[in-house]
């Protein structure tokens, strides 16, 4: 079942690896479900069912003209859960923009079928700098992103991903091949989805959605995230979610699922193991095996 059709007729590309309790992985902007491959493979090896899909407009999914607001994106997530049958004991894990889909699903769909959540380098609860959100990202910086993409998207992304992965900041940065891969994946997306989703994640206020998190929630964020600063997002989300656990990665950039891949995958497994039906020690030992 590589594709499912949403309620508005959009085709979404879905990966469904392994067997066991479902863990649904929602990718960040402007990537695709391929960005979760290492974690998805590790989770499947550890006895979980890893489900990852390409957001509408990105990767191999359809590119409709509309539907890039978070209400529609949360409905897409609900459709993925329904079509894959992951409707009773799922854990939703959203990276960056994907955290917004998790938050809006929890409020708009009342967290139906969800037993746990993860917000990883997430934009939740609010990125934009306002009078009541002084640590947020200035509107001018968000407009610079949109202008750079409109002017020369192919020239914009190489520089963007260097900051995304902390190149020039980390003692052991990602390789140029990783940057090239990320640019290639980003270039699979349509221009309309790229711009519309940037508008959505930069301006959607999820503070009212936090009360809908009534399940254990893992919040992971890098303290040196220059793409989605930790204060108005990770730290604020953990403060506003009753059953949250905040794990800060000191000095880590935005793309910590790559730069801190082994640590993050172990932390994710530890979190999943704390829920009913957790993994055995043998499964944990197999987590990072190819």
Image (spheres, helix red, strand yellow):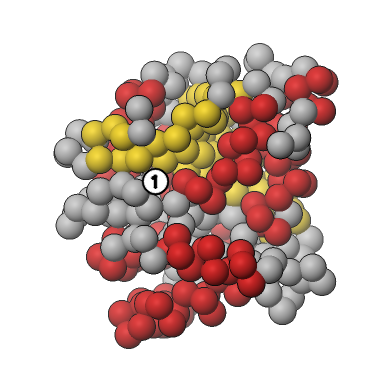
Going by the picture, which residue comes out furthest to the bottom? 151
Q: Residues within 10 Å of mark 1 (few under 14, many from 20)?
A: many
Q: Nearer the viewer, residue 121 or 176?
A: 176
**Left or right: where 273 falls relative to 9:** right
Residue for point 56% across, 24% down: 18
Q: Nearer the viewer, residue 90 or 104?
A: 90
The C terminus sits in image quarter = top right
* Numbered circles on residues, count: 1
**Left or right: where 53 falls relative to 37:** left
Q: Nearer the viewer, residue 270 or 223?
A: 270
Q: Is residue 241 visible?
A: no
Asked if residue 108 is positioned above or below residue 194 in the image, the reply reads above
Q: Position of residue 171 (x, y in %)?
A: 82, 71
Q: Is residue 44 visible?
A: yes
Q: Position of residue 15 (x, y in %)?
A: 45, 35
Q: Which residue is mark 1?
A: 54
Asked if residue 7 is positioned above or below residue 233 in the image, the reply reads above
Residue 80, quarter of picture: top left
Q: Position of residue 247 (x, y in %)?
A: 73, 47
């Amino acid at each position: 079942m590589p594709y499912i059709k949403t309620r508005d007729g959009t085709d979404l590309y879905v990966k469904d690896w392994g067997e066991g309790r479902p863990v649904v992985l929602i990718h960040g902007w402007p990537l695709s479900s391929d960005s979760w491959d290492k974690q998805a493979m590790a989770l499947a090896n550890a006895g979980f069912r890893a489900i990852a899909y390409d957001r509408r407009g990105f990767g191999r999914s359809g590119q409709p003209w509309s539907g890039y607001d978070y209400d529609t994106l949360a409905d897409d997530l609900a459709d993925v859960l329904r079509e894959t049958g992951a409707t009773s004991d799922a854990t939703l894990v959203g990276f960056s923009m994907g955290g917004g889909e998790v938050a809006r699903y929890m409020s708009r769909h009342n967290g139906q079928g969800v037993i746990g959540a993860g917000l990883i380098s997430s934009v939740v609860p609010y990125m934009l700098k306002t009078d009541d959100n002084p640590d947020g990202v200035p509107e001018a910086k968000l407009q610079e992103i949109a202008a750079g993409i409109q002017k020369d998207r192919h020239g914009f992304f190489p520089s963007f991903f260097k900051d995304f992965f902390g190149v020039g900041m980390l003692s052991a940065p990602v390789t140029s091949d990783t940057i090239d891969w990320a640019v290639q994946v980003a270039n699979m997306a349509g221009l309309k989805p790229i711009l519309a989703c940037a508008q959505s994640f930069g301006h959607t206020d999820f503070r009212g959605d936090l009360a809908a998190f009534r399940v254990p929630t893992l919040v992971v964020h890098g303290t040196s995230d220059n793409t989605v600063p930790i204060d108005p997002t990770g730290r604020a989300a953990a403060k506003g979610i009753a059953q949250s656990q905040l794990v800060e990665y000191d000095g880590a950039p935005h793309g910590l699922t790559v730069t801190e891949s082994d640590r993050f995958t172990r932390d994710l497994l530890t979190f999943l193991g704390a829920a009913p039906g957790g993994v055995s020690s043998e499964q944990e030992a197999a987590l990072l095996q190819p």
